[in-house]
Image (cartoon, helix red, strand yellow):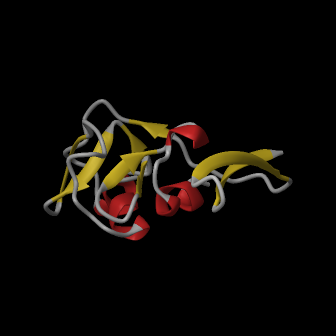
Amino acid sequence: MAKKCAWDTAKKTCGLFTDTTTPTTKATTSVFCTPLLEADCSITEGCAWVNKACTHFTGCTPFKLATLEECKAISKNCLSDGIHCVPYDACNTYKKEKSCVEAV
């Protein structure tokens, strides 16, 4: 069973609920990101697609992107809070509804 985040509108907090579906993931690791193409870069652990090139991934928060799709294009480890990219984390760490419900 997969655990997902859910936004509690009354408390304005993010919490955990259990989902019976199992997500599929493709986890790969690369020491050198530079030769990777766009399709492989953002799903490769330690790499990020930035300015039309694959580079080493240093974190989500420097990127001011408003949508999940934009943040995931940088790295599979990122989602959006509506203002900038944030890393996937424990549900109770999300401060905004958008990042909470996008955390799958």
Residue 41 in sight from this viewpoint: no
In this view, the residue in front, 97 or 77, is 97
Give left or right: position of 104 versus 56.
right
Outermost residue, left direction? 51
Residue drawn at the location 13% of the way across and 61% of the way down:
51
Instruction: Give the percent coordinates (x, y) of residue 49.
Output: 25, 55
Give left or right: position of 77 versus 4.
left
Residue drawn at the location 42% of the way across and 65% of the way down:
68
Residue 44 in sight from this viewpoint: yes
Q: Which image quadrant is residue 57 in?
A: top left
In this view, the residue in front, 78 or 6, is 6
Instruction: Give the percent coordinates (x, y) of residue 26.
Output: 56, 48
Quadrant that contains the C terminus:
bottom right
In this view, the residue in front, 48 or 7, is 7
Instruction: Give the percent coordinates (x, y) of residue 20.
Output: 86, 54
Q: Which image quadrant is residue 74 in?
A: bottom left
